[in-house]
Image (cartoon, rainbow, N blue to C red):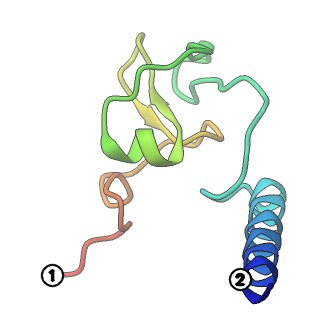
Amino acid sequence: MVPFFMFIIIMGLLLVLVIYGTFAKNRWGINLDPVICPRCNKSLATIRTPKSLRQVLWGGGTCKTCGIEVDKWGRPLSSSTRGLGGPHLT
């Protein structure tokens, strides 16, 4: 009985995380709107082909017209945020 309640609590916390991420537009959110390239204003493909592990895990894509990499919200990614862990510490 206890594992069932732990499962419900964990799933509830994940649901809250996804809902918050959708409103805050962070990597945990779900974007149902079409993504527009910020550089050339072209629409990115609805069915995407991920080009990196970050795109597989967190969404986003690469514009076929200009080659810029964007997150799932259509924001351009800088070179320091393209990896999985964000900025690299040296």
Q: Amino acid at mark 2?
A: Pro
Label number found at residue 17: none
Instruction: Indicate the quadrant where residue 68 lies.
Output: top left
Q: Is residue 57 above or below residue 88?
A: above
Q: Residue at x 31, y 38 (%)?
A: 52
Q: How far is disc 2 from disc 1 in space, using C-alphas?
A: 41 Å
> In the rendered structure, which disc, 2 or 1, sits on the residue that comes first in sequence?
2
On the rendered structure, is 14 left or right of 78? right
Q: Residues within 10 Å of mark 1 (few under 14, many from 20)?
A: few
The percent coordinates of residue 88 (x first, y second) are 25, 72
Q: Is residue 70 above or below residue 13?
A: above
Q: Nearer the viewer, residue 56 or 44?
A: 56
Q: Amino acid at mark 1?
A: Thr
Q: Residues within 10 Å of mark 2 (few under 14, many from 20)?
A: few
Q: Please tell me whether mark 2 sits on a helix, a strand or a loop.
A: helix
On the rendered structure, is 42 left or right of 66? right
The percent coordinates of residue 5 (x first, y second) are 82, 82
Mark 2 or 1: the one toward you: 2
Q: Quadrant of the C terminus?
A: bottom left
Q: Is residue 53 above or below residue 79?
A: above
Count of picture labels: 2
Q: Check the image and name the residue furthest to the front.
A: 1
Instruction: Indicate the quadrant where residue 26 lies.
Output: bottom right
The percent coordinates of residue 74 (x first, y second) are 61, 36
Q: Residue at x 41, y 12 (%)?
A: 64
Q: Is residue 46 above or below residue 80?
A: above
Q: Which residue is mark 2?
A: 3
Q: Check the image and name the residue furthest to the left.
A: 90
Q: Which residue is mark 1?
A: 90
Q: Residue at x 42, y 20 (%)?
A: 49
